[in-house]
Image: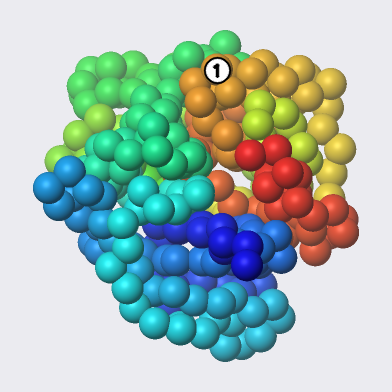
Amino acid sequence: MMKKKILAIQGSSLKKINVMTDTTLFLSLEAQKRGYKVYYFEPKNLSFIDGKVVARCIDLVFFENKKKFYKVNKSINFNLSGANIILIRNEPPFNQQYINSTFILEHIDKKVKIINHPKSIREVPEKLFSMRLNKYMPSTLISQNEEEIKRFFRKNKEVILKPIEGYGGNKVILLKNFNKKIINRYLKKYDHVMFQKFLPKVSKGDRRVFIINGKNKGSITRVPKQGSILSNIGKGAKAKINKLTKQELKISTKVGSLLKNNNIYFAGIDFVQGQLIGDINVTSPTGLKTYYNLTGINLAKYFWENI
């Protein structure tokens, strides 16, 4: 009898999953079709014990197009060295717990293939890594110095504020002038903050590009709901199919190559008005299910075929 392949997934709470759009579920369903048994755990269930990396997992089966989208067979303590592949798919914030989990998983990276690689996740922090890509971005400041921030507002007028550890459009705001009270509140809570020149054509949508194994494999446009500047699907944006411009294709190719050289297998990058907006999504990139719904192209197949 052929031994079952094991896919271990470090994810967020299953209660958070939207069965219509979730990429982790989409990847898991394709893995099951390829003969993988799925073990699922959250970072809080990950332990280092006398040289072994162990997780309290649920042995489960995922289902397609069902409200009750999974069934738990049993709970087990699993030595993660016994997995064939580990997927790191828990959502940010990229806080100390997230960082700790990457160090623990890195202990077994010679025994198990881990996607994305834990060390690479640390070395490609989603907003700070974009400093390497500044020439493709709108005017950007990362700072907690009030005088630098004032100068940036004088130069750019309307400015977007993003917490460095932020994700999913959370706590992203637009200021039309320097507001000391709001800015100081952000700096007190988040320390360094990303400030970026506002690009008004975000109302027409941003472009999410899927980078798999260093290649641009597809993209969608996400259009914010009326009155919003947030193009995240989780914030009410609607997705549609699009065609990238020559400039966007050129930048995507360069970024894809850079990410592959940094051992990042799966990422999402975003454009507004043909410019990168500084979020290199490497912790838990999303959008593959939405892309499939719009095009019929299943990038989960490409994902697994090229691992």
Label 1 neighbour load within 10 Å: few <14, some 14-19, many 20+:
few
Quarter of the image holding residue 298?
bottom right
Give the camera-side residue of 14 and 270: 14
Q: Position of residue 207 (x, y in %)?
A: 70, 40
Q: Position of residue 279 (x, y in %)?
A: 50, 35
Which residue in the rendered view is the most extreme toward the left? 50
Q: Which residue is mark 1?
A: 261
Give the camera-side residue of 161 and 306: 306
Which residue in the rendered view is the most extreme toward the front? 1
Q: Is residue 3 above or below residue 216?
A: below
Quarter of the image holding residue 164?
top left
Residue drawn at x 69%, y 77% as measured from the top left: 64
| Left or right for 23, reference 283 | right
Which amino acid, by three-letter code, is at mark 1? Asn
Quarter of the image holding residue 47?
bottom left
Q: Position of residue 280 (x, y in %)?
A: 52, 33
